[in-house]
Amino acid sequence: MNDGAEPLVSVVDDDEALRDSLRWLLESAGHKVAGYASAEQFLAAYDPAQAGCLVLDIRMPGMSGLELQDELVRRGHPIPVIFITGHGDVPTAVSALKKGAIEFIEKPFHDQSFLALIDNALAYDAEVRVEAAKKVSLAVRFSKLTSREREVMERIIAGRRNKEIADELEVSIKTVEAHRAKIMEKTGAGSLAELVQFASDHGAQRRG
């Protein structure tokens, strides 16, 4: 299970010597590491809430690296994947990139190049998780709006003035102003521009 914000580098390769070598290299660079001898073993232990990245051999007995990638995509778990490939696997690795892998690296590879890829993958994962957390936060905030506040908000972000909104909804301008204040309070928007941005990020529909 996830034991905090520290990212975990998961290495999945049936070659025990390579797993041990990569673990030593990664740990020497300050990374937290977990090694798995098979894709099935990794899936049994995988916690999507755990920040990190996946170092994955393309060819393994049982479930292949590509099949594991497909399974993670199917589950909606976009963990960054770096594929380890042999020379003959490069076309396959290119195909994996098109499915969302971060990068592939050919055996034998340079330690510093590998560590640079790990750093990039972890930075990407952190960025994705920050964006996902923002979306969850926005969803919670927008869920607090009443149906009437949503109607007012749609008109605000469409550029309607308070009087226009009041006329359309057949309410007083003071009522619109009160709804507007509540909308800004509940969404945490500090300005109209920020409200528009929040609504766009949340996917709220604008009225034309």
Image: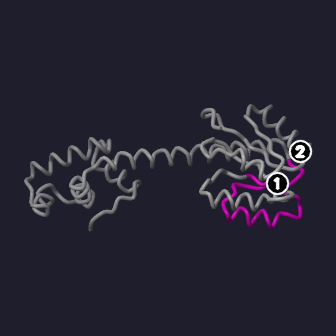
Is 103 rendered above or below residue 123?
below
Picture quadrant of residue 33? top right
Q: Which mark sits nearer the N-terminus, 2 or 1?
A: 2
- Please tell me how crowded label 1 is: few (under 14), some (14-19), or many (20+) other residues with Cα within 10 Å: many
Picture quadrant of residue 93? bottom right
Magenta span of residues: 82-109
Indicate the secondary structure of the residue bearing disc 1.
strand
Is 11 rendered above or below residue 31?
below
Q: Give how far across and how far down residue 161 sits, in percent.
A: 16, 57
- In the image, what residue occupies the spot 84% across and 49% down? 13
- In the image, what residue occupies the spot 78% across and 48% down? 41
**Callouts 2 and 1 close, C-beta under 8 Å:** yes
Q: Residue flagged by tag 1: what amino acid is it?
A: Asp
Q: Give how far across and how far down residue 187 sits, in percent.
A: 32, 45
Q: Please give left or right for residue 26 compared with residue 50 in the image.
A: right
Numbered badge on residue 57:
1
Q: Please give left or right for residue 132 compared with residue 184 in the image.
A: right
Q: Please give left or right for residue 131 compared with residue 27 in the image.
A: left
- In the image, what residue occupies the spot 36% across and 52% down? 197
Is 111 rendered above or below residue 94?
above
- The quarter of the picture where the N terminus appears is top right
For mark 2, what is the residue?
A: 18
What's the image's color scheme?
A: one colour
- Between 96 and 14, the one lying in front of the other is 14
- The quarter of the picture where the C terminus appears is bottom left
Q: Give how far across and how far down residue 113 sits, in percent.
A: 79, 46
- Please tell me how crowded label 2 is: few (under 14), some (14-19), or many (20+) other residues with Cα within 10 Å: few
The alpha-carbon separation of the residues under discs 2 and 1 comes to 10 Å
Q: Give how far across and how far down residue 199 sits, in percent.
A: 35, 54
Indicate the secondary structure of the residue bearing disc 2.
helix
The reply to whether the magenta stretch includes residue 179 is: no
Q: Residue flagged by tag 2: what amino acid is it?
A: Leu
